[in-house]
Structures are given as C-alpha cells and as structure tokens.
Amino acid sequence: MKHAGIYYLANSTKYYLAELEVKDDSIKIFNVDSDKLIYKANVHELINEISIQGNSTLIRFPDGSSFIPDDPSLKWEWDSLSSKLIRKITNNLKSLVLIILLTPLFLFFALFYGMPFLSSEIANRVSQDSKEVISTNLLKKLEDEYFEESKIDYLEQEKLKKEFHKNLSDLNINSDNYRLMFYKSDIFGANAVALPDGTIVVTDQMISKLLNSPNLIMAILFHEVGHVEDNHGLSQIIQSLGVGLIITLIIGDAQGLSDALVGSGFVLVQQSFSRKMEVEADIFALESLKKLEMPVEDFSNALESIMDLDEDAYSPYKNYLSSHPHTKKRIELAKEYRQ
C-alpha cells in the first residue's frame, strides 16, 4: 500500500514529494519525480508521534528525517496504544475538558490522601536494617548542622535511659530497638525527635525544664515512641520523595523553578500530613501512661511546662503551617482523654 506525502530530510529544510510504501514490517520512501528509493526503515524503528484531529500523522525516522502524508485522516496501524488513546481523547472535546478539570482534583487527592496511605504501607514493609541506615545518615546530618554535645550530667542521662527502657519492657515493646540520646541544640530548643530506627533524641533544654519531674519526661518520650511504632518518620520521608517526584514530573526540568516549588511543596504537604501523626502519637502516649498506671495528666503537664518556651512560635499563621498541632489544643486533648 502506498501513501502520497512529503519527505523531509534530517536537520534540513529540504524535502521531496514522495510516496511511502508499507509492506509487512518494511517501510520504503520513493521520490515521486525520479521514482528512486530514497529511504528504507523497519516499523519497529519508528519514533511514535501523537496526532491531533485535523493534522496529518507524522512519521519520524531514526535518522531524524520524517514523512507527512497528504491525507490528514490517515492513521498508521503500528501506532502505540498510548498514542491511540491520547488521540481518541483529544478528538473528543468533552473528554478533553473533563480531564483538564479533573486533573487538579486528582492531584489533590493523590498528594493528600493517596500518598499518605501508600507511604504508610511501604514504611510498614521496610526492614529494621534499612531504617538503621536511614537513621544513621539523618543523625549525622543533625549532628553536623544542629546538635552539640550534651551538657546534661552523665549519671542523670544513664538514669533516664534505664527508666525509659524499663517502661518499654513493661509496655511489651522491644527495648532493644530503642536508644535514648541527648544533645544541646539552640535551634531545636526544648524538643524531642524520633528517628525511624527507634533512636530518640532529647535536647538539653527539654531535660533541664523537666529534670525535677521524670514522669513528665517519660510522657514526652512515650509520644516519640508512638511515632516510631507507627512508622511516622519513615512515612514522611517516603511522602517527601513521592511528592518531590510528582512535582518534578509536572513542572519539568527548569532547575531554579523546580527547586523552589519542590521545596515549598515538601513544607506545606508534609506539615499537613504530620498534624494527624502528632495526634496519633499523643494518643499513644496517653494509652501508655494508662497501661503503666501513671497519671494521664502527666502528658498535659509536660506540654504546659514546655509551652512557655515555645509560645512565641505560635501566631495564627505559624500555627496553620506548624507540624505540631497548637500546644493548647494538644493539652485540651489530653485533658479530655483523662475524663
């Protein structure tokens, strides 16, 4: 079967009036004026192009040359499935408009619902060895950029570690998977951080504030254990990778714009995810206190004790973007749980 059209040479404006002959998997291009063979290729070597209704289906060859048939309605039998599907959609105005309208909605649900669910499922299947590798790298970065050597007395540190591991055993949690570490950090302030492998870092500012109330320190540590047991930290890392990939695919490879948008996407999306995780960790801490027959109000008291150190961090706008729910709201949850 032959098809009339125009054959364009590779990297050139020169062209020939030509005929394309298809036979089995072979394609031959003949010069109409001289009837000489000017190009030959195999169907499997072709570079697929997406055709739009009203435009001729262009064939692009491996050397960069191309052929455009005179008949704009002509469709090639070897078109890829994706090309046929896209052509069918673009030829239907209603389908095209519907896709344009639904795409932002799809992305919203993918980022804020699908990604959290998927990341949680993946995190639950990651081995402890892999968590340790990730946590070691994270801790090194924190040590290099944010942490300094702890000034808390060594005996006091050992006392807290012993009490912490005893409580974990009483909760039927494998204490071998946890280690408690202490650092000074002016940037983190009074805080505690749980890494995916069970490493829990507590700042000197937190210990100093609660040093005379070890039960309150334990209440905060139970909250961090809740993050580890539910794989929150690892889920956030996987979410970040997934969100970054989606945003990068959408905006392409414009380096400056990509970095800015991906960075802001991580912040906003991750903060939204982690608010729910913080509440789950709070509930874990409250349940742990009950199981150990410790006062449930220890958790709210711990939050109240450190709230004055962080009060300036909470404006209506910062609260909206904060990874932790407003401390006052967490205190209310703890008090309601006690009732």
Image (spheres, grey):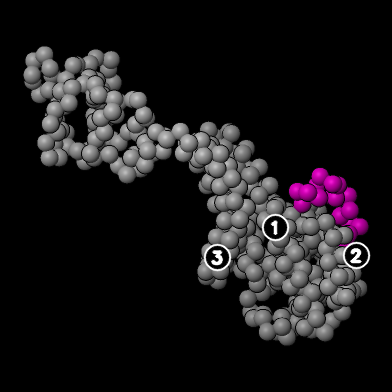
Q: Which residue is mark 1?
A: 274
N-term mark: 3 or 2: 3
Residue 162 vs residue 297: left or right? left
N-term mark: 3 or 1: 3
Which stretch did the figure color magenta?
305-322
* Structural distance between the alpha carbons of marks 3 and 2: 36 Å
Would you identify the image quadrant in which residue 91 lies?
top left
Q: Please state which of the two labelled residues, at mark 3 or mark 2, is closer to the viewer.
A: 3
Q: Residue at x 81, y 53 (%)?
A: 186
Q: Amino acid at mark 2?
A: Ser
The one nearer the camera, 256 or 71, is 71
Dot 1: element: helix
Q: Amino acid at mark 3?
A: Glu
Q: Residue 24 got which mark? A: none
Residue 2, position in %: x, y?
Answer: 14, 28
Residue 282 vs residue 93: left or right? right
Would you identify the image quadrant in which residue 278 lies?
bottom right
The one nearer the camera, 282 or 215, is 282
Residue 163, position in %: x, y?
Answer: 78, 81
Magenta span: chief secondary structure? helix
**Does the stretch in magenta take in 306?**
yes
Looking at the rendered image, the quarter that the C terminus falls into is bottom right
Q: Which residue is mark 2?
A: 305
* Structural distance between the alpha carbons of marks 3 and 1: 16 Å
Dot 3: element: helix
Q: Amino acid at mark 1?
A: Ser
Q: Residue at x 70, y 57 (%)?
A: 274
Dot 2: element: helix
The correct choice, above or below, for 2 with respect to 134 in the image is above
Q: Residue 121 got which mark? A: 3
Disc 2 + disc 1, Cβ < 8 Å:
no
